[in-house]
């Protein structure tokens, strides 16, 4: 028996707090008037399967109870003003973190909220209070297990409408299979959470979605859960695309064998372009590497499955590796007798995630004209294909132990330049002014993603961006020797040896300034100038720094991007190597004069600000500085002469 101070109830746990109104005693920590955090649109699932609106006030009550229990303060007595501020601050942090994850699709339940309370109290140094809260949770858990309640039989509904009893062991088997080879995975904990979301009448078709969402929601507790979620989703995609059942070790061979049938069926159903049938499909199938699906992070895989993979009704007819090869084939259409070899070269870059075409290109490459025309945004897709096709080098795929693999980077950029140059000719039959301009200037837009996933310092980001610019210019000059320079090249500054960073005043190498914006080039650009002088250059513009949120999600499961200030400083540092547009997404919390000032200062820095809400935007719920700090950073960068 726990000792209680007279008049004080047991320490409140969130399972009771979330199912009962807060006590009548009022204090700042239980004030519900916090519109910046609370949200009645977010639901919390209780242990009995029912849901109710999220409540910051109830979290504050649970924290307050823990603090009072440690200090032997009766429940009906108020705490000091300073203690109220601590409790309120903890409740704010926990609520904001939970709501951020809920907005990204995470499921909120009592256990998750209780875990967050524990973690935040420990992170903020309130270890005694956290320990008291943990012990009380354990007592409550044991008490629940001791209750002899008759378990309810739950039935799920099969695709054919028949009902069958829900079997948790089947779910355990799927989770165990997905967790194979991963360390630190608590399959039992996952199963308990999944069972809480399976209600009577749940469709079996929904169970994979529940499994994936539950595993994703535990990524902050177990890093391996992101991989479990992606494997569960991949298994579902495979079952739709390849209906045959075989032992796991034989599946890669079956996956290759089914490729040609999948392409033929998708063309027959008017999902994919008929030009794909002009390839030796069996030869290309032998190049498929099923194990590369393991590289895909779950959030990006969900985007790919929903937006990119071809479908026949509700059934997906492509696996991720089929998709990468299909995109590669589309980008190699005009390579003549070398198209098979070029398609495999492009596939190698795409499937290893070293180079990724833009989101728009990925949506339409190899699709039938009927599918492209059916898309509401087909007009903008055509503009992307004919005006300035884009793609992104994944920096994380070229950095090992903090060092840049420049040979691999050159090979990647060379492939990227070639496949984007091919994309310009997708619509040869178009005669409008924009299409003609695209053919006259052959502008492409190579960007960089994966700065954060690579853990790149400012200096590494700067040098990597220079290396991409160097490789792109050299590759385009070499391609001009093969295909000729772009028609308007003779009128450009390329012919007089001008490079993107011309005219900058570079910092001295021995400068004591820790972060020089305009350091001297690390590459010997003489060879680039010589190649351009000899061959001209194939593409009028080469680089652009633009947000690519879906592609970032493909390459990394990281939950937090760099802060706005870090992104901005990196953009300013790297933009000197870029001959095309540079964009940065402004945080959505910038309003009024702060927002206007941030836009103005970004433009003064030569950066084009996205103004929210925008279609292409980085995560807006993890920008870690406020409006005043954002404008301060911008002013500082301007004052440095950036």
Image (cartoon, rainbow, N blue to C red):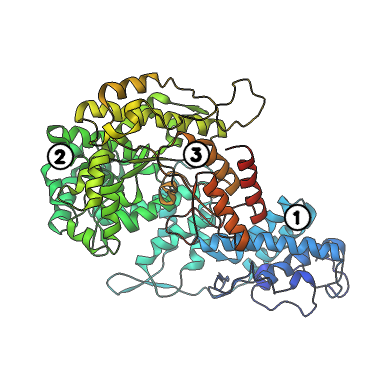
Q: Earlier in the sequence, mark 1 or mark 2?
A: 1
Q: Nearer the viewer, mark 1 or mark 3?
A: 3
- The answer to whether residue 296 is seen in the rendering is yes
Who's the residue at 80% across and 73% down the image?
A: 27
Task: List the residue tagged with mark 1.
Answer: 131
Disc 1 from disc 3: Cα separation: 38 Å
| Residue pointed to by mark 3 | 451
**Image position, residue 112 (x, y; %):** 60, 61
Say whether residue 65 is left or right of residue 428: right
Q: Is residue 354 above or below residue 557?
A: above
- Other residues around mark 1 within 10 Å, as few (<14) / some (14–19) / many (≥20): some
Locate the C terminus by quadrant: top right
Residue 338 at x, y percent in the picture: 16, 32
State the SS at label 3: loop
- Report the Cα–Cα distance between label 1 and label 2: 62 Å
N-terminal-most mark, 1 or 3 = 1
Q: Nearer the viewer, residue 485 or 497?
A: 497
Q: Residue at x 77, y 52 (%)?
A: 127
Q: Nearer the viewer, residue 224 or 441?
A: 441
Q: CA distance from mark 2 to mark 3?
A: 37 Å
């Amino acid at each position: 028996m726990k000792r209680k101070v007279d008049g004080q109830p047991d320490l409140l746990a969130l399972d009771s707090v979330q199912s009962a109104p807060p006590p009548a005693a009022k204090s700042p920590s239980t004030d519900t008037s916090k519109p910046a955090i609370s949200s009645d649109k977010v639901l919390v699932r209780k242990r009995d399967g029912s849901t109710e609106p999220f409540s910051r006030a109830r979290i504050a009550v649970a924290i307050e109870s823990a603090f009072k229990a440690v200090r032997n303060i009766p429940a009906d007595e108020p705490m000091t003003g300073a203690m109220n501020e601590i409790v309120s601050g903890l409740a704010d942090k926990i609520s904001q973190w939970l709501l951020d994850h809920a907005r990204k699709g995470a499921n909120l339940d009592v256990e998750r909220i209780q875990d967050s309370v524990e973690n935040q109290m420990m992170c903020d140094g309130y270890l005694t209070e956290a320990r008291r809260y943990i012990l009380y949770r354990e007592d409550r858990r044991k008490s629940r297990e001791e209750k002899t309640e008759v378990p309810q039989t739950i039935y799920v509904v099969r695709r054919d409408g028949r009902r069958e009893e829900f079997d948790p062991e089947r779910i355990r088997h799927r989770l165990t299979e997905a967790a194979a080879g991963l360390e630190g995975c608590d399959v039992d904990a996952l199963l308990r959470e999944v069972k809480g979301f399976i209600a009577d009448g749940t469709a079996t078709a929904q169970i994979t979605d529940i499994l994936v969402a539950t595993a994703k929601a535990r990524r902050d507790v177990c890093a391996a859960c992101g991989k479990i979620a992606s494997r569960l989703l991949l298994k579902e995609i495979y079952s739709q695309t390849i209906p045959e059942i075989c032992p796991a070790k034989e599946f890669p061979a079956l996956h290759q064998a089914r490729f040609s049938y999948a392409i033929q069926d998708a063309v027959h159903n008017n999902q994919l372009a008929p030009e794909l049938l002009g390839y030796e499909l069996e030869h290309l199938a032998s190049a498929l590497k099923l194990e590369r699906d393991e590289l895909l992070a779950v959030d990006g895989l969900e985007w790919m499955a929903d937006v990119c993979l071809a479908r026949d009704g509700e059934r997906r007819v492509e696996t991720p590796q089929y998709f990468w090869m299909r995109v590669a084939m589309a980008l190699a259409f005009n390579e003549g007798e070398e198209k098979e070899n070029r398609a495999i070269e492009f596939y190698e870059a795409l499937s290893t995630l070293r180079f990724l075409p833009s989101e728009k290109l990925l949506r339409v490459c190899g699709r039938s004209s009927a599918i492209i025309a059916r898309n509401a945004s087909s007009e903008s897709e055509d503009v992307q294909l004919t005006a300035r096709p884009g793609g992104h080098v994944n920096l994380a795929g070229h950095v090992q132990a903090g060092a840049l693999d420049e040979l691999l980077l050159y090979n990647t950029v060379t492939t990227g330049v070639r496949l984007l140059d091919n994309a310009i000719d997708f619509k040869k039959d178009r005669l409008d002014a924009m299409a003609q301009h695209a053919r006259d200037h052959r502008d492409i837009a190579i960007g960089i993603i994966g700065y954060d996933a690579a853990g790149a310092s400012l200096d590494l980001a700067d040098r990597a961006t220079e290396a991409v610019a160097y490789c792109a210019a050299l590759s385009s000059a070499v391609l001009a020797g093969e295909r000729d320079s772009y028609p308007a090249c003779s009128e450009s500054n390329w012919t007089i040896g001008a490079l993107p960073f011309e005219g900058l005043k570079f910092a001295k190498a021995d400068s004591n300034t820790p972060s020089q914006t305009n350091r001297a080039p690390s590459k010997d650009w003489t060879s680039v100038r010589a190649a351009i002088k000899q061959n001209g250059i194939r593409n009028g513009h080469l680089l652009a720094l633009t947000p690519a949120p879906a592609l970032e999600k493909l390459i990394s499961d990281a939950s937090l991007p760099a802060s706005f200030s870090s992104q901005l400083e990196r953009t300013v540092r790297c933009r000197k190597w870029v001959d095309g547009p540079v964009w940065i997404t402004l945080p959505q919390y910038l309003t009024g004069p702060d927002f206007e000032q941030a836009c103005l200062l970004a433009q003064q820095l030569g950066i084009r600000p996205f103004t929210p809400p925008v279609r292409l935007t980085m995560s807006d719920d993890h920008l870690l500085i406020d409006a005043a700090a954002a404008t301060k950073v911008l002013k500082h960068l301007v004052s440095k002469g950036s």
